[in-house]
Image (cartoon, rainbow, N blue to C red):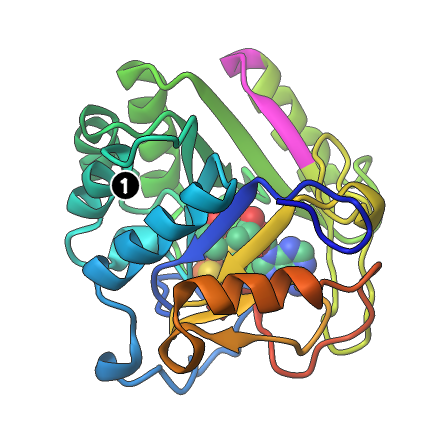
């Protein structure tokens, strides 16, 4: 399906929860957030039904994100349900890896093909400073398990302040090389100030080739991360909400006061 600027929209990112077991300084406040009431969260049936419609309209690539997708109860079942939809060529997930040691194998068995893992530092204290949780050991064990299980692709997402020459980023680069993993360096963005950059080693942040729409955990189809536009699937139904997002997808992002990385998943 094409938007008004002739971009072919083939990629759907689904945020399955706004909850998270870390509190990264650039993403969430220390005290946590006002959680979406459970009844407002989309059920797995809602998500699968929506995805089926999206795939029938031209989506072929799906990524699960959050908050932290592995804290959503039954996430492995959701992966299995989505992988059963005919027409999905690529199913992936973005995670902080805190729970990945436990989930890597079941996720792979359920059909998950690729995984992106967030890792900003290899220094225990720096990691705890950035994420406000002392979980580096669990994360590294999660990465080892993902490698062992043998996903088609594992990428690391490393958030940097300005440059990939910062000490934390250099260490992550070296670690990735040792483990044979790719790294994407993401400069810290600010939704409210409209500060975003092209992702080094990825496709994000480049409006002219943007092929994405997003489904938020409370059921809005978002045409752009850096915009306040959003169309509720409860109000419009799946197809109409997708068409509205497509018709109104801005040529390029500006600012967003509604969206947060933890509700829309980056
Ligand atoms: N919890 C999972 C994780 O951290 O991988 C998935 C959701 S998280 C919101 C998705 C991605 O967004 C992560 O790679 C994270 O580093 C990135 N992110 C969050 N806040 C950001 C910000 N202000 N600027 C740039 N990237 C950000
Ligand atoms: Fe949680 Fe991911 Fe946000 Fe960090 S970036 S607080 S891990 S949702």
124 or 190, which lies in front?
Answer: 190
The x and y percentages for residue 11 are 55, 42
The residue under the point 37% across, 57% down is 68
Q: Is residue 113 above or below residue 161?
A: above
The x and y percentages for residue 66 are 42, 59
Task: Kindly state the secondary structure of the residue where label 1 is placed.
Answer: helix
The x and y percentages for residue 258 are 61, 82
Range of magenta residues:
178-184
Residue carrying label 1: 82
Q: Is residue 187 above or below residue 30?
A: above
Q: Is residue 27 above or below residue 33?
A: above
The residue under the point 43% across, 52% down is 65
The residue under the point 22% across, 82% down is 39
The residue under the point 73% across, 46% down is 210
Q: Quadrant of ligand 1?
A: bottom right
Q: Quadrant of residue 112?
A: top left
The x and y percentages for residue 71 are 26, 57
Q: Is residue 182 magenta?
A: yes
Q: Is residue 236 magenta?
A: no
Q: Quadrant of the C terminus?
A: bottom right
**Any part of residue 167 in sight:** yes
Q: Quadrant of the N terminus?
A: top right
Q: Is residue 95 left or right of residue 184?
A: left
250 or 225, which lies in front?
Answer: 250
Q: Quadrant of residue 193?
A: bottom right
Q: Quadrant of residue 177?
A: top right
């Amino acid at each position: 399906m094409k938007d008004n600027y002739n971009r072919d929209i083939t990629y759907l990112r689904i945020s399955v929860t706004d909850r998270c077991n870390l509190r990264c300084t650039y993403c969430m406040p220390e005290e946590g957030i006002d959680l979406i009431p459970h009844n407002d969260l989309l059920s797995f049936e809602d998500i699968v039904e929506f995805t089926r419609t999206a795939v029938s309209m031209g989506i072929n690539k799906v990524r699960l994100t959050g908050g932290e997708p592995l804290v959503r109860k039954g996430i492995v079942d959701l992966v299995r349900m989505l992988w059963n939809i005919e027409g999905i060529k690529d199913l992936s997930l973005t995670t902080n890896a805190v729970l990945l040691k436990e989930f890597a194998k079941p996720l792979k068995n359920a059909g998950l093909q690729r995984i992106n893992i967030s890792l900003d530092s290899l220094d225990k204290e720096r990691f705890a400073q950035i994420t406000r949780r002392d979980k580096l050991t669990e994360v590294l064990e999660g990465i080892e398990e993902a490698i062992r299980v043998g996903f088609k692709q594992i990428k690391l997402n490393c958030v940097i302040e300005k440059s990939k020459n910062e000490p934390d980023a250099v260490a992550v680069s070296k670690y990735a090389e040792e483990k044979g993993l790719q790294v994407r360096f993401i400069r810290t963005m600010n939704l409210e100030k409209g500060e975003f950059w092209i992702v080094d080693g990825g496709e994000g942040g480049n409006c002219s080739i943007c092929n994405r729409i997003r489904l938020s955990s409370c059921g809005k189809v978002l045409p752009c991360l850096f915009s306040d536009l959003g169309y509720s699937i409860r109000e419009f139904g799946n197809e109409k909400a997708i068409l509205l997002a497509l018709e109104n997808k801005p040529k390029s992002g500006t600012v967003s006061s509604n969206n947060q990385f933890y509700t829309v998943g980056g």
